[in-house]
Image (cartoon, helix red, strand yellow):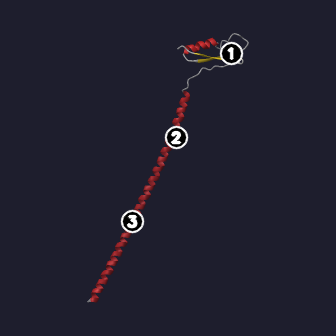
Amino acid sequence: MLGMSALRFSTLVTSLSLFCVAGCAGSSSETARQLERMQERIAILQNERDRLDERVTALEQHQEDAQAATTAQTKGNAANQRPSLRVVTLQPETEEAEPKEHEPSAAAVANSAADDGAEHVLISGTGDRLTATVVEGTK
């Protein structure tokens, strides 16, 4: 009897051992499948992050280009907003005492300065004797 129960006991232990080994093997394959799915998800997330990085870089570059264009346009507009200035040409005085018709006299320049209300500098003289006079406008 003892031999028979020992046989049954050993069969039972062997069966349980095989069952546990089979159960662990199944668990191992399930773990491997879960690991594989996680690696696939990680690869998908890394690809999405790379695409996002490319889009952000493109947006930043576009913003920098737009700012550079705006700055250049602003500088161009500032240069165009300067007031137009009257051109004065200086020529050496000739032997003639009377001024030519196309050249304004000092009195005409002083009168025009008085008309526009701004300060003007009147430079007159000959050779190395030049004098500068500030003429204020009356406007």
> Marks 2 and 3: CB-CB under 8 Å?
no
Q: Residue at x 49, y 47 (%)?
A: 57
> Marks 2 and 1: CB-CB under 8 Å?
no
Q: Which residue is mark 3?
A: 33
Q: Residue at x 39, y 65 (%)?
A: 33
Quadrant containing the N terminus in the rendered view: bottom left
2 or 3: mark nearer the eye? 2
Crowdedness of circle 3 by 10 Å Cα count: few (<14), some, many (20+)?
few
Farthest residue, direction left = 1
Farthest residue, direction top = 98
Crowdedness of circle 2 by 10 Å Cα count: few (<14), some, many (20+)?
few
Give amino acid for label 1. Gly
Q: Which residue is mark 1?
A: 125
Vertical relation: 80 (above or below) 5: above
Say whether disc 1 or disc 3 marks the residue closer to the N-terminus. 3
Horizontally, residue 66 falls left or right of residue 86, namely left
Residue 110 percent coordinates (x, y): 60, 13
Q: Which residue is mark 2?
A: 65
Q: In what element is the residue under mark 2?
A: helix
Whole-Å distance between the Cαs marked 2 and 3? 48 Å
Say whether disc 2 or disc 3 marks the residue closer to the N-terminus. 3
Give amino acid for label 2. Asp
Give amino acid for label 3. Arg
